[in-house]
Amino acid sequence: MGEFWVNRDETTINQKTRYTEIHVPDGKPDVLQQIEHGVLQLVAQVNAIGYAIPGINESHLYQYRHLGDAVNKTDNLVYNPRLDSLQTDGRTSGTPDDRWAFTNRTPHMNYGTAISLAAASRALKDYNPELSKEALRVARFIWDDEHNHQANPEEQTYSGRFSNPEFMKSIECRAAFELWRSTDYEDYKTRMNELLPTLLEQFNRNASVIAQMIPFMDNAFKKQVRPLVEAYAGELAEVDKENPYGVRISTAGWAGNRNIVQACITNYLLHRSYPELINPEYIYRGLNYLYGCHPCHNLSFVSGVGAQPKKVAYGSNRADFSFIPGGVVPGIRILKPDFPENREDYPFLWSENEYVIDLAASYIYLVNAVNSLLK
C-alpha cells in the first residue's frame, strides 16, 4: 500500500463492533485500518466541535494508572444524568463522563489536521471510499474556515514555535500541498507557491516538507533546491565530528530519538531526489542507533525488536516495569554537563522511557525506507 506497499495483515479490526484481536488476520492491510481509525476520530472531532482540538484525556486518576488493555480506561457508556452515583459528601449527582475533551482552538492544530485528512483521503480512496470523501471534505472545510476565521481574545494562543510566523507559513504551505495533491485544485497550488520562498529561506527547518514536494514539482524547482541540498549535505558531514554514532544526539531536556528518526526520514526523502548528494549511510545510521549503537548501554530502544530490546518503559499500560512490543522510547538524555543516561531501573522518567505513538509511526516509515534502499 502506498509508497512501500505495506500489506501486512496480522490483526482483526472491526470498527462497527469495536472488536480487535491481534495475531488474527482479517484480509485487510493493518496500516489502512490504522489510518481509518485515526480518520474516524479526527472527522468526528471537527464535525462535533467545528475545528480540530488538542486531545481527549481520561478524567480520573484511577483511569490514568490502569493496568492491562486500554479498554479498561472507559465504561463505554454515554453520559446519562439519570444514572446517579454517590459522592463522598453523601450527595448524588449524574455519573460523570470518563473523557475530557480540550477544546481550545489553534491554527497549527487545524492545519495539521487538514494535512492528515487530505493525505489520508488518498490512502483510503479504494479501501473506504465514503470515509475518503468525508476526510477530504473536512480537510477542505478546515482550510476555508481557517482562512475566513476571525480569532477572538478568548481563544488560547501558544508561545514558542507554534506562534512563530515562519512555522505557521510552513504548516499552511504543507496543508496547501496535500490539498492540491488530493484535489488538483489550482488555488491550493497558488497559495503553496506563494509560501514556498519563506520555506526555502529556512531550508534546514523545512527540509522534510520541501523534500516531499520535489517529486511533484517541475525541474526548475528541483534545480532551485539543489544548492540548498548541497549545503545541507555538507552539514550532515559535520555531525560525524560530534560523536562516534553519526547522528545528532539531543542535549535538551527530552531525549532525542524522535529527532534522529525524523532526520533520517528527511535524508531518505532528499536521497530519493538527489541520490548523488545524500549518502544512504545517513539514513541507515538512525536504525543502527535505535538498535543499540548508542551511549549508556546497547539495548534496542524498540521494545520487542533486536537482540536485547528495551523491556522497561512507560506506556498506556501502567504496570510497573513492563513493556509493549513495538513501542519506541525517547532514548538517551544528556545530563549536564555530558553524562548520557537511559534508566533501566526506573521506567517513569518520561523524557527517557515514555512510549510516544508518533515516534512508533515514524520508526515504521524509516524501517520501510531502509528496506526499500536495501531491496
Image (cartoon, helix red, strand yellow):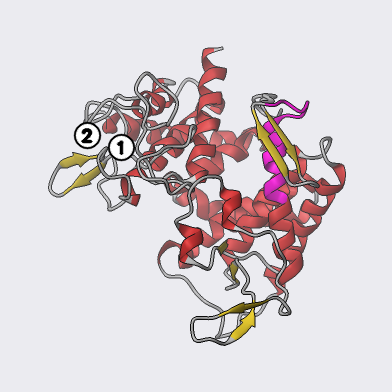
Q: Is residue 28 covered in magenta?
A: yes
Instruction: Please give the residue where the numbered disc 1 appears in the rendered image.
Output: 248
Is residue 145 left or right of 161 when viewed as pictured? right
Please tell me which residue lies in front, 130 or 284: 130
Q: Amino acid at mark 1?
A: Arg
- Residue neighbourhood size for the residue with mark 1, other residues' Cα within 10 Å, grouped as few (<14), some (14–19), many (≥20): some
Residue 53: x %, y % from top left: 61, 66
Question: Is 267 or 118 nearer to us in this picture?
Answer: 118
Please say if 154 is above or below 190: below
Element on which disc 2 rests: loop
Disc 2 crowd rating (10 Å Cα; few below 14, some 14-19, many 20+) is few
Magenta stretch secondary structure, dominant: helix
Report the side of 336 relative to 68 (left or right). Answer: left
Q: Residue at x 84, y 49 (%)?
A: 133
Q: Position of residue 187 (x, y in %)?
A: 76, 56
Q: Quadrant of residue 151?
A: bottom right
Instruction: Tell me, yes or no, if residue 334 can be seen here.
Output: yes
In the foreground, 342 or 358: 342
Asked if disc 2 and disc 1 are in contact, CB closer than 8 Å, the reply is yes
* Residue bearing the label numbered 2: 242
- Extent of the magenta region: 24-39
Which secondary structure, mark 1?
A: loop
